[in-house]
């Protein structure tokens, strides 16, 4: 598919957090066909990242429970998808900038293990919840990006 066609169709982003070293098989099904994956921290190990990379390219940040294996990961990341900039960090309480003033249309975070979709001053805050084995019904999110329009969807696993 050409870049122009991709821009018209938009992008589908798989959003995941708080896997804590466990890759649920349902994640692969939920993320089938996504263009890229964002992991918002507390990954747990390299194996989770490798399983996600087998599905699509991955952007990941380090969470508070990620040990020494994750020192190569940043605590924050800026992801450009088509026409939008997304700010990614593990714990939204550590956000030290005004996302709207900085030009971000969305902030993706994890940490709470509770899925949430909020609009704060015109900025989408998306927490996919937890996909770990510690959550009785895990969740991830899909984010459809068309131009500057964002359509989040929480997906139960």
Image: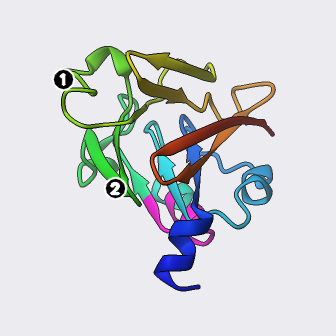
> Residue 66's x, y, as percent?
38, 38
The image shows residue 8, relative to residue 81, as above or below, that is: below
Question: How many marks overall?
Answer: 2
> Image check: 35 left or right of 38?
right
> Residue 145's x, y, as percent?
54, 51
Please indicate, yes or no, whether residue 56 appears anywhere in the rendered image.
Answer: no
Please indicate, yes or no, whether residue 6 appears anywhere in the rendered image.
Answer: yes
> Residue 51's x, y, as percent?
60, 64
Q: Identify which residue, 3 or 141, lies in the foreground.
A: 3
The image shows residue 121, relative to residue 34, as above or below, that is: above
The segment highlighted magenta reads 49-58
Q: Which residue is mark 2?
A: 80
Q: Residue furthest bottom?
A: 2
Residue for point 52% across, 29% down:
126
Q: Secondary structure at mark 1?
A: loop
Q: CA distance from mark 2 to mark 1?
A: 17 Å
Q: Identify which residue, 8 or 96, lies in the foreground.
A: 8
Q: Identify which residue, 5 or 69, lies in the foreground.
A: 5
The stretch drawn in magenta includes residue 123: no
Instruction: Name the quarter where the C terminus is drawn.
Output: top right
Residue for point 80% across, 28% down:
137
Q: Identify which residue, 82 or 41, lies in the foreground.
A: 82
Q: Residues within 10 Å of mark 2 (few under 14, many from 20)?
A: few
Q: Disc number at residue 97?
A: 1
> Image check: 30 left or right of 117?
right
């Amino acid at each position: 598919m050409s870049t122009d066609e991709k821009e018209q169709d938009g992008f589908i982003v798989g959003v995941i957090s708080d896997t804590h070293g466990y890759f649920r098989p349902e994640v692969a099904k939920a993320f089938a066909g996504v263009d890229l994956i964002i992991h918002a921290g507390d990954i747990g190990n390299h194996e989770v990242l490798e399983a996600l990379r087998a599905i699509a390219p991955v952007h990941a940040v380090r969470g508070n429970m990620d040990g020494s294996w994750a020192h190569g990961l940043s605590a924050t990341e800026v992801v450009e998808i088509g026409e939008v900039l997304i700010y990614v960090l593990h714990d939204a309480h550590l956000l030290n900038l005004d996302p709207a003033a900085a030009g971000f249309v969305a902030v993706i975070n994890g940490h709470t293990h509770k899925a949430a979709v909020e609009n704060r001053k015109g900025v989408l805050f998306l927490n996919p919840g937890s996909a770990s084995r510690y959550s009785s019904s895990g969740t991830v999110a899909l984010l459809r990006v068309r131009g500057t329009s964002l359509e989040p969807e929480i997906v139960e696993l």
